[in-house]
Amino acid sequence: MKNKVYSFLVLIVSVAVAQSAGLIGSLATRPNIDVWYRTIEKPDFTPPDWVFPVVWPILYLLMGIAAWLVWRSPRIGRRAFSSDGVSYESMLLNRRPVRNIALSIYGIHLLFNILWSFLFFEWNLIGVAFAEILVLLGLIVITTRLFYRVTPVAGYLMIPYTLWVVYASVLNGTIWWLNM
């Protein structure tokens, strides 16, 4: 019973940490929507403003649950991705606990997630934000693969976020192109 309560508390903290990344990013975003974002040129495939505060909390919830699933997994990652048993992941991570590496990269990725909001909305550095979101996307893909390696469900929970950031990357790149 005590372990279940502790695990539940870690789940709450994990979701809170992910949601906090969104909250910190919103400190840069919200004040600049009316002042700056509405004034720049955007492509036709830009979603309406109400979509973002609906989608992001759901994605942060899924990320927090995925991180919790990885945290509670006792496995040492020795599973390879290919049928031969050889992959760059298995070569790099063969003797180290993948769980700890996955959670470390997840934490780094959250910092990049927060940074993007400041680059784009607060400092209006659209081109720099575009370069940064591509790095962020790479970190998300790595995190997703490592999460999957520890526990597949955690990797699957990261897929909607990955797809959303692919879309956000295209949107950011197009906004940069239109406003050069």
Image (cartoon, rainbow, N blue to C red):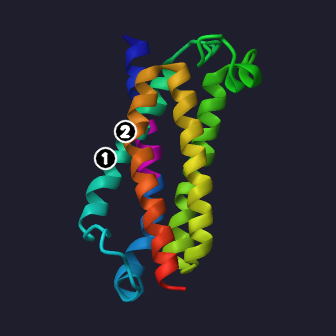
What is the quadrant of the C terminus in the image?
bottom right
> What's drawn in magenta, residue-wise?
14-20
Q: Residues within 10 Å of mark 1 (few under 14, many from 20)?
A: some
SS label for mark 1: helix
Look at label 2 and name its amino acid. Leu
SS label for mark 2: helix
**Which residue occupies 62% across, 15% down?**
80
Image location (x, y in percent) of residue 69: 45, 24
Above or below: residue 84 compared with residue 120: above
- Judged by its main secondary structure, the magenta piece is helix
- Return the mark for residue 70: none
Look at label 1 and name its amino acid. Ile
What is the quadrant of the N terminus in the image?
top left
The one of 85 and 63 positioned closer to us in this rendering: 85
What is the tally of numbered marks visible in this picture?
Answer: 2
Is 5 on the left-hand or right-hand side of 127? Answer: left
Quick check: marks 2 and 1 in contact, CB under 8 Å?
yes
Q: In the rendered image, is residue 149 in sight?
A: yes
Instruction: Please name the residue that numbered disc 1 is placed on.
Output: 58
Image location (x, y in percent) of residue 86: 69, 16
19 in the magenta segment = yes
Q: Residues within 10 Å of mark 2 (few under 14, many from 20)?
A: many
- Return the mark for residue 62: 2
CA gap, disc 2 and disc 1: 6 Å
The one of 110 and 131 positioned closer to us in this rendering: 131
**Which residue occupies 58% across, 63% down?**
115
**Which residue occupies 54% across, 80% down?**
124
